[in-house]
Amino acid sequence: MDAEAGPTEIAIIADRTADPRFLAADLVAQAEHGPLAACLLITADPALAKRTEAELRPQVASARHRDTVQAALAGQSACVLVDDIEAALAVSDAWAPEHLEIQAQDAAGLAMRVRNAGAVFVGPYAPVSLGDYLAGSNHVLPTGGTARHTAGLSVLAFMRGIHMVECSGAALAAAAPHIDALGAAEDLAAHVAAVRIRVPHGQDVTSGARPATAGADAQQRPAAGPPIRPDLAGRAPYGAPQLDVPVRLNTNENPYPPPPALVQEITHAVTAAAGALNRYPDRDALSLRGDLAAYLGHGLTARQVWPANGSNEIIQQLLQVFGGAGRAALGFEPSYAMHPLIARATGTRWIRGAREADFGLDADRTVRAVREHQPDLVFLTSPNNPTGTALPLAVIEAVCETAPGMVVVDEAYAEFAREGAGTALALLPRYPRLVVTRTMSKAFALAGARVGYLAADPAVIDALLLVRLPYHLSAQTQVTARAALAHSAELLATVAHLRAERDSLVGWLRGTGLAAADSDANFVLFGEFGDSHTVWQGLLDRGVLVRETGPPGWLRVSIGTPAEMAAFRAALTDVLANAQGGADR
């Protein structure tokens, strides 16, 4: 029986989170099949493309079938640079590859959106070699674009399907010895290498390097390392670099420390609380909730406010109650990276919506996304991190009118917004499923105390009590936050200075020929660079730490003191001058 299968194909959709070593290994593994093999890397990150090209050189040079690999990569192979992940999916669907690897954030979510492919390999630990030998995807898959209308050869050939392969690092490590043997038998060394570059011999990726143990006893024992949930295995934890450098402008902290009078009051309050540390704190933090309600205004009461250890714990509680297995949350990226991370940690499926070219949200498109996906939660951020974009209240209203579940508006940077920007707090009386989250880490200069909070209908707060840990907010945290709220006018006086410094920086960046996003926060997103990592490293080499985040080609800088911003300007000027000098040479 003839099948619609010709020379082999691979397409890899990758973003800046992908490992270029893995990408190069997978391209070489497919190329060793023959000179007509077609290998495509699809990415929106030019820097990743360059790093992958650099990784290809030594891997091709050392390949067992080097001449075949070189012929394939020089033939029907290419790197396709696209604007964003949506365009990457469109390119892949148009080509309809035999094998599609997705090595990007939310790879599983992206895989569910693939329309045309023979088989899909999901995440960094699911190389095509795994499917060739052990994972069970069909080995006779449609090529030449025929995946648009047919599937792999089987008794189900008259039904069209897409094979998906997802694997954790631990599972790939367990399968690797079998792939070693099968790949050696076929004399396809690059297939084996594509696995072993991920899980070297004797290494368990869930617990670091660990020698393999021989003998019957070892075969009877379970695999070394803790039994991490499969959907979490192989993932990297969240965290901005904490480096000891002269100028730290990467975590959006308020650069001005608490004033001496507040430090003294906090000291007295914590000392007083220490005398009763043998007792649990106020479980419901009623006094703090009253102070927070008074600060927010809008007629709110203590029954409508809930505090926790940072706004991330607030978000986690919301997803624990309203998300979870079988439920989904929708967010519009680029946005706060913790939203999808906490969603996954709570078993909530994350759906990625898109922003406009100016990083804003169009009301009609946003509403269409809500109607299409019917999520249990919608996350909106205003001002948005990492772009600084404020969201018009009309967009929030439109979403509240449409969403079938909860609408969470993250206002962590609300105090830095321009006058007249508005706040979703004003909409709470009309929408009982609306939640507004805030933090004391930014404008209140209280990042070290870890205090976040939300405002919502009392019924929402009653629901959160189902998942809050008992006595979750320490006595010291509660009295520290109350002392800061008592000094709110003094603390918020720094906000005007930071706004002015922000707006000045935006003008300066644009004056240098760079792009800078309009910001209503205490940071600025700037670019666009062909290799943003090189610029980031150049700034770090000059003692200035900024954040690698946001769309490919962009960086984010927090607003610091005038001296810190002067140091940033000088360092960036030098980095750009050196880059230009290198280009001229």
Image: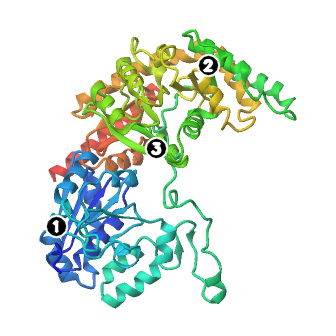
Front-most of 136 and 381? 136
Whether residue 261 is situated above or below residue 173 in the rendered picture:
above
Residue where numbered disc 1 is placed: 77
**Percent x, y of residue 532:** 31, 47
Residue 19 falls left or right of residue 91: right
**Percent x, y of residue 386:** 39, 35
Judged from this view, the residue extending furthest toward the top is 299
Residue where numbered disc 2 is placed: 304
Residue 77 falls left or right of residue 237: left
Q: Quadrant of residue 470?
A: top right
Judged from this view, the residue extending furthest toward the left is 75
Q: Amino acid at mark 2?
A: Gln
**Percent x, y of residue 485:** 64, 17
**Residue at position x 71%, y 26% from top?**
478
Q: Quadrant of residue 456?
A: top right
Say whether disc 1 or disc 3 marks the residue closer to the N-terminus: 1
Q: CA distance from mark 2 to mark 3?
A: 26 Å
Say whether disc 2 or disc 3 marks the residue closer to the N-terminus: 2
**Residue at position x 67%, y 32% from top?**
465
Residue 339 falls left or right of residue 270: left
Is residue 334 among the parts visible in the rendering? Answer: no
Front-most of 315 and 538? 315
Residue 172 falls left or right of residue 144: right
CB under 8 Å between callouts 2 and 3? no
Number of numbered discs on residues? 3
Q: CA distance from mark 1 to mark 3?
A: 33 Å
Q: Amino acid at mark 1?
A: Ser
**Residue at position x 67%, y 24% from top?**
481
